[in-house]
Amino acid sequence: MHTGPARAVGTPLTVLALVVVVFALVLGGAGAAFAHAGLSGSDPADGAVLKAAPQYVTLTFTESVSFSDDSLRVLSPQNERVNPRPARHVDGKDNTARVELSGKLPQGTYTVAWRVVSADGHPISGAFVFSNGKPSQTAAVVATGSPDDTAVGRLYGVFRYVAYSGLALLVGAAAFVLVCWPAAATIRPVRRLLALGWVALTASTVALLLLRGPYETAGQLTSAFDPAQLGRTVTERPGGALVVRLVLLAAAAVSLRWPARRTADRTGPGARLRPAGALFASALAVTWAAAEHASAGVQVALAVPVAVLHLLAMGVWLGGLITLLLLLRRRGSDGQEIPASAIGRFSALAFSAVAVLVATGVYQSWRQVGSWEALSTTSYGKTLLVKIAAVVLVLCAASFSRRWTARLGHEASPATVTAEAPAGDGPGDAAEAPLFEADAYRRGLRRMVTVEAVLGVVVLVITTVLTGTQPSRAAGQRVATASAAEPQAQVVTVPFDMGTANHQGTVQITLTPGRVGENTVEAVVYTPDGGLATVPELRLTLTQDALGIGPLDAKLKNQKGYWAAYDLRLPMPGVWTLNITVRTTDIDQVTVRDTVRITSLPG
């Protein structure tokens, strides 16, 4: 809730316009951004058919990665592991992973399954295949879902939400006490709010530390208590950050026990606690920034302090809002209410927090999104759009809260009460009217703060989702890499008469990569209703009439559901004619034709 003097009251449309302009300027000139590693290359390449068995499998990523003993597995066509030793970095390069293969590999198609942890602490996984000699069918089965789409991953995500919530409550309530109204430290609900923030943050940090190992390695939930795995976790950067957070929270447990009376006077010991409180909150925020998106990619030296400021501003604003709402709804037996001066001080503090949130959020968006197109084509960009919309709603609600606060502050001014007291009224009228209006202003403010706090929680949830989502630029890199590594294909679909009245099937021919040299050919026959058709024979020949080449027989073989050949060599680029003969019964067959363009080798 960013508020101020009555003359500074703005409109929701003004706030909306400012936000739209700021984000347009920033995203319009956005440059490259990096976080979450992506696979940039492999040796052997995805889909490669090798004449001799490789000695190693090497993966290269867009940024540094860490891995466990089981991070890189090479599986034979029979689903047996053929790399006896774990992966290692190549020549000390942190963005590589290499495994040595067994001495002699039989011919066939091998599956490479990998799962590593990127520099920002998030696990990523994938798989690809290569063939030694001729390709073959393989029994290897590799999970292709998201690394977070597991029982451990989902539980880890829940505790990340709890950790952010605990940080907001702890930092926001403490900031409200130390800056806005030190006497609030004597109020039991505020002290309970501080304790709740500490407990939520501590419990979630312990849970995250235990779950970190199985989260990285896709292990079972029961392995969270494995001492060896926990030992590895605490030696890595994300686990080390969690340990530091626990140490800080243990120190905070002592600080939270200071006598409430020491903070009752803003000029006394309570004021002297502010620098220590700011240092403690900053150190807590660093345990996030040093182990997540800000710690990887470009401008890390700037991104980490920006992320710290963003987290602190979020905590001061959202946690302070919840504290204010608690105090506005409180009706103590002693009749003590939060004074208008304390609300005014929080107004100034909240305004500064929101300004920092916008400024740091703009920078983080520039760093992580990268382009206008990424806003609508990536999960990170779409989630960011939802967050921007939620922030705009928060700012609109805050503008209304600002009005109520300005009225309440104006009504509480002694000069105003004296000036507005009507002459000739009864002795109690001059005091009752302002008190009645002040009470109405408090109710209005309480309603708007409730709306603002609810929207703030929504923003917090979206922010937590963003921290676990692959940034747009990195997602774009992975798509580009996959496109480059994956062979292009030429697909031709040709209708043919199945020999029965009004029954016309189709045969689909796929040539991969559809270039000069060796190609894989797959042919599938479909019935008129789109189902797979079984035919006793399927032949394919190719000719190039312009150069008088052919016919070249593809020598298709029945693969129990489709027909295929893996060694068709095409010597020249250009337009080739496909001659497809489909035998529908023992005595009936039909030949159809179509064309396909074969391209030259790249480079």
Image (cartoon, helix red, strand yellow):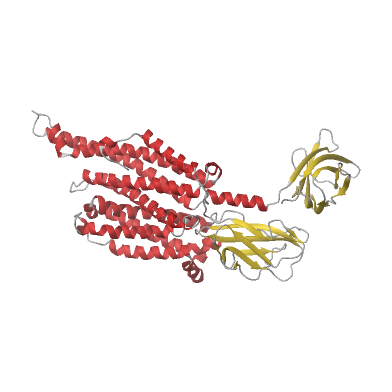
**265 or 544: which is nearer to us?**
544
From what the image shows, is residue 314 above or below residue 90?
above
Residue at horizontal 43 percent and vertical 55 percent from the top: 302
- Residue 592, given in percent of the width and then of the height, sits at 85, 39
The outermost residue toward the front is 603
The outermost residue toward the right is 587
Residue at horizontal 45 percent and vertical 40 percent from the top: 25
**143 or 401: which is nearer to us?**
401
- Residue 138, given in percent of the width and then of the height, sits at 72, 59
From what the image shows, is residue 435 above or below residue 232?
above
- Residue 63, given in percent of the width and then of the height, sits at 55, 59
Residue 111, picture quadrant: bottom right
The outermost residue toward the top is 424
From what the image shows, is residue 518 above or below residue 227?
above
**Residue 560 in view of the camera:** no
From what the image shows, is residue 262 above or below residue 392?
below
Residue 18, picture quadrant: top left
Give left or right: position of 53 versus 224: right
Give left or right: position of 264 versus 76: left
Q: Looking at the figure, which quarter contains the N terminus?
A: top left
**Residue 267 in view of the camera:** yes
Give left or right: position of 2 versus 301: left
**81 or 54: which is nearer to us?**
54
Residue 260, picture quadrant: bottom left
- Residue 348, given in percent of the width and then of the height, sits at 28, 45
Q: Total marks drawn? A: 0
